[in-house]
Image: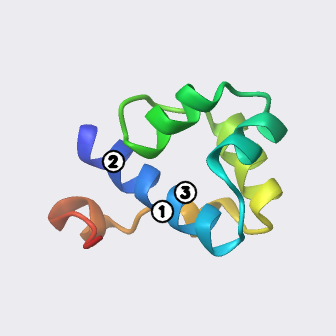
Amino acid sequence: MPSLSISLGVKIRAMRNRKGFSQDGLALQCGLDRSYMGRVERGEVNITVDKLYQISELLGCEPAELLPRINEVDRGIKR
């Protein structure tokens, strides 16, 4: 479901920005390539549950905070 990946990526990017992480910094701490993190944030790839938990831990939030609500997936998130 591409819209789910896009919505998740938008939420990860927003939380990363709120917490003051650069994309490079977060990717490095997660053990991911920066270009892959960019693809995650653009919704071009799916991440594993393990990576979702790792990202949320580094961002200091619960994984559920990064998951889009059903209505965000159906209508898309306003950017």
Left or right: residue 52 versus residue 35 is right
Task: Work out how far the residue at label 2 is from the one at label 3, CA to CA, in angstroms.
Answer: 10 Å
Q: Residues within 10 Å of mark 2 (few under 14, many from 20)?
A: many
Pointer 2 or 3: first along the chain = 2
The residue wearing badge 3 is 12
* Residue positioned 45% across, 33% down in the render: 39
User: Which quadrant, please, contains the N terminus?
Assistant: top left
The residue wearing badge 2 is 6
Q: Secondary structure at mark 2?
A: helix
Q: Residues within 10 Å of mark 3 (few under 14, many from 20)?
A: many
The residue wearing badge 1 is 11
Q: Position of residue 5 (x, y in %)?
A: 37, 43
Q: Secondary structure at mark 3?
A: helix
Pointer 2 or 1: first along the chain = 2
Task: Work out how far the residue at label 1 is from the one at label 3, CA to CA, in angstroms.
Answer: 4 Å
Q: Amino acid at mark 2?
A: Ile
* Residue positioned 38% across, 42% down in the render: 42
